[in-house]
C-alpha cells in the first residue's frame, strides 16, 4: 500500500494530492454560534499534512475553516507544503473591481497569506450576467499575483465553456461526482477534455452512504447532519433506497474481489475518469479518521468486469436531472435543505420592470445595451399575460461582445439574457411558447441547437432557425422569444 496519496499537477506550479481534504465539517460543528479553537483544530489537521494529505478545500461559508487553515499554514512559513483551496460565493449584485477585490482580500486575510493557491468562484444564477464581471476581475487579480490559479464550482458544461471563451484561465471545476451522481461524466467531461480543465469531485461517498455500513440496512427515517440530508435526496432521485442498494451490492462484490473497502471502490471509479484531478474527502477534526483506508484507493484498478457489474447496477437507476450545478439553481433542489427556492426568490431580478408611459397595461425591461435607447426598443415588453422579447445578441453591458467566434457560448449568454428579462416580468422558462434563432453561419446549427435544447428540452416551444446574410456587429447568433403566462 502506498504511504502517501498520489499526486497530480492541477496546473503549472500547483502540484496537489489526488485526495483533497474538505473542511465542510467545520460549518456543521459550528452551527448554533459555536466557534472551534483554531489552534486546536490546526493541530488536528497537522496530522493530515504529516501523512501526505497536504491539500485542503474550504469556502467563505465553511465557518472558520479559512482561519483554521491560516493558522496551519502560517506555522510552516514560506516553504509550506500545504495547498489551500477556497471558494468565494457572493450574493448576486454589482461585481465592480472594488467589490471583487474586497471579497478576495477577505479570503487572503483569513488565510494569512498574500496569494491564494486556488480561488474557486460560485454564482447562484446565470441569468444575472454579472458573474462574467466577477470572473473578469478575478482574472485580473490572478495576473496581479494575488491568486495562483482560478477554479469554479458547480458550473455546468455550457457556462464553463462560455467563461473560457471569455479568456478567463480556469483550471478546475468542483462538482458532485459519484456512483450515484454521474452527470459529470457526460458533457462536462467533454468540455474539460477539449479545454484542458480538470474536475475536483465532491460527494464521491455521498456523505458516507457509499460504504458497507449502509449495505443491506433499512432506509433511515431521520438524518441529523446536513451532508447526509443532501445526498439522501440524490438517492431518492435515482429511484430510492432499494435501487441504491443495487449499487452498494455491486460495489461490495468488487471490493471483496480486490480486498479493499466499498468506499475505496466508489472513490476509485471517480478517480479513473480522465477529467478528474482529485476527489475531496472529509477531513475529520473531532471524529474518527480514515486516512489509511483512503490510501487503498491507489492500490488497485477497476477491471472490465468491475465496470460491467457497476453498469448493470446503473441501468436500474434514474439519472440525476440536468447538468452539474443545476441542483442549486432549479428544481429539484438537491441540497441539504431540499429547497433553495426561497433563497433564490430573495435574489432581486436582474432588471427592474418599468411601466410604459400612457400604457398602464404594459411593462418593459431594458438590459443596459447602448442599442436599446439608441434604436428605441426594449429588451422585453409584457402586455397582459404575454411577454415579447426582442432579438437578443450576446452583448454584455453596453457593448461588449461575449464569446467572440463561439456560437454555442453566445447562445448560452443570449438565452440567459432572455430568461432574465422574462423573469423580471413575472414569467419563467416554462412560459416560453416560441423562439426564433438567426444564424450568421448555418454550420453552427448543431452547436446552437444543443444549447437551446439544454434550456428548453422539456418545454419544447415552437421554434424557427434561419441562416441570414449578416448580423449587425461581430455576432454569430441572435434569438427572440415569446412567452405566455398562465
Image: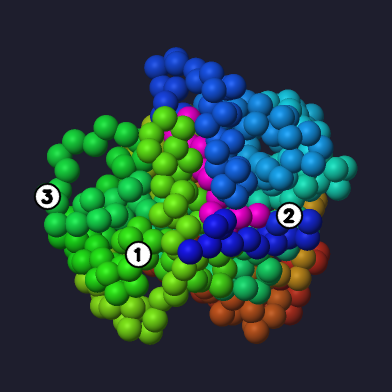
Q: Is residue 206 above or below residue 228?
A: below
Q: Nearer the viewer, mark 2 or mark 1?
A: 1
Element marked by disc 2: strand
Q: Position of residue 145 (x, y in %)?
A: 85, 43
Pointer 1 residue: 260
Pointer 2 or 1: first along the chain: 2
- Measured Cα–Cα span from mark 2 to mark 1: 30 Å
Q: Position of residue 398 (x, y in %)?
A: 78, 46
Residue 21 magenta-highlighted: yes
Element marked by disc 1: loop
Residue 436 magenta-highlighted: no
Q: Is residue 416 above or below residue 427?
A: below
**Can residue 162 be seen at all in this image of the molecule?**
no
Q: Residue 14 — which label? A: 2
Q: Residue at x 78, y 56 (%)?
A: 13
Q: Which residues are magenta?
A: 16-26
**Do the residues bearing badges 3 and 2 touch, measured as CB atoms within 8 Å?**
no
Amino acid at each position: 500500500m502506498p504511504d502517501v496519496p498520489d499526486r497530480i499537477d492541477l496546473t503549472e506550479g500547483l502540484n496537489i494530492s489526488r485526495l483533497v481534504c474538505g473542511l465542510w465539517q467545520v460549518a456543521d460543528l459550528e452551527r448554533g454560534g459555536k466557534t472551534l479553537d483554531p489552534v486546536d483544530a490546526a493541530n488536528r489537521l497537522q496530522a493530515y499534512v504529516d501523512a501526505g494529505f497536504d491539500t485542503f478545500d474550504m469556502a467563505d461559508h465553511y465557518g472558520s475553516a479559512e482561519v483554521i487553515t491560516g493558522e496551519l499554514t502560517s506555522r510552516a512559513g514560506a516553504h509550506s507544503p500545504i495547498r489551500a483551496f477556497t471558494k468565494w460565493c457572493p450574493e448576486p449584485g454589482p461585481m465592480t473591481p472594488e467589490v471583487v477585490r474586497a471579497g478576495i482580500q477577505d479570503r487572503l486575510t483569513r488565510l494569512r497569506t498574500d496569494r491564494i493557491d486556488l480561488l474557486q468562484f460560485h454564482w447562484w444564477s446565470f441569468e444575472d450576467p454579472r458573474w462574467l464581471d466577477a470572473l473578469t476581475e478575478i482574472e485580473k487579480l490572478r495576473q496581479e499575483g494575488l491568486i495562483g490559479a482560478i477554479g469554479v464550482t458547480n458550473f455546468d458544461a455550457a457556462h464553463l465553456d462560455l467563461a473560457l471563451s471569455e479568456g478567463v484561465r480556469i483550471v478546475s471545476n468542483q462538482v458532485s461526482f459519484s456512483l450515484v451522481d454521474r452527470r459529470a461524466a457526460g458533457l462536462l467531461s467533454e468540455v474539460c477534455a477539449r479545454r484542458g480543465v480538470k474536475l475536483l469531485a465532491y460527494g464521491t461517498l455521498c456523505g458516507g452512504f457509499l460504504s458497507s455500513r449502509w449495505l443491506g440496512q433499512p432506509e433511515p427515517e431521520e438524518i441529523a447532519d446536513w451532508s447526509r440530508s443532501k445526498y439522501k435526496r440524490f438517492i431518492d432521485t435515482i429511484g430510492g433506497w432499494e435501487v441504491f442498494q443495487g449499487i452498494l451490492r455491486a460495489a461490495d462484490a468488487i471490493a471483496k474481489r480486490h480486498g479493499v473497502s466499498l468506499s475505496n471502490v466508489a472513490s476509485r471509479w471517480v478517480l479513473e475518469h480522465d477529467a478528474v484531478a482529485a476527489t475531496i474527502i472529509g477531513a475529520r477534526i473531532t471524529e474518527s479518521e480514515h486516512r489509511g483506508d483512503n490510501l487503498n484507493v491507489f492500490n488497485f484498478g477497476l477491471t472490465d468486469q468491475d465496470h460491467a457489474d457497476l453498469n448493470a447496477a446503473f441501468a436500474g437507476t434514474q439519472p440525476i436531472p440536468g447538468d452539474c450545478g443545476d441542483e442549486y439553481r432549479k428544481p429539484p433542489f438537491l441540497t441539504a435543505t431540499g429547497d433553495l427556492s426561497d433563497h433564490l426568490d430573495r435574489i432581486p431580478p436582474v432588471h427592474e420592470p418599468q411601466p410604459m408611459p400612457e400604457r398602464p397595461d404594459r411593462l418593459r425591461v431594458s438590459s443596459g445595451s447602448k442599442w436599446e435607447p439608441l434604436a428605441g426598443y426594449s429588451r422585453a415588453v409584457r402586455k397582459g399575460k404575454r411577454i415579447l422579447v426582442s432579438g437578443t445578441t450576446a452583448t454584455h453591458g453596453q457593448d461588449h461582445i461575449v464569446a467572440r467566434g463561439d456560437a454555442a457560448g453566445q447562445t448560452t449568454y443570449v438565452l440567459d439574457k432572455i430568461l432574465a428579462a422574462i423573469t423580471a416580468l413575472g414569467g419563467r422558462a416554462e412560459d416560453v411558447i416560441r423562439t426564433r434563432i438567426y444564424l450568421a453561419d448555418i454550420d453552427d446549427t448543431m452547436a446552437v441547437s444543443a444549447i437551446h435544447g439544454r434550456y428548453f428540452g422539456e418545454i419544447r416551444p415552437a421554434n424557427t432557425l434561419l441562416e441570414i446574410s449578416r448580423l449587425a456587429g461581430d455576432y454569430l447568433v441572435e434569438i427572440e422569444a415569446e412567452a405566455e403566462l398562465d
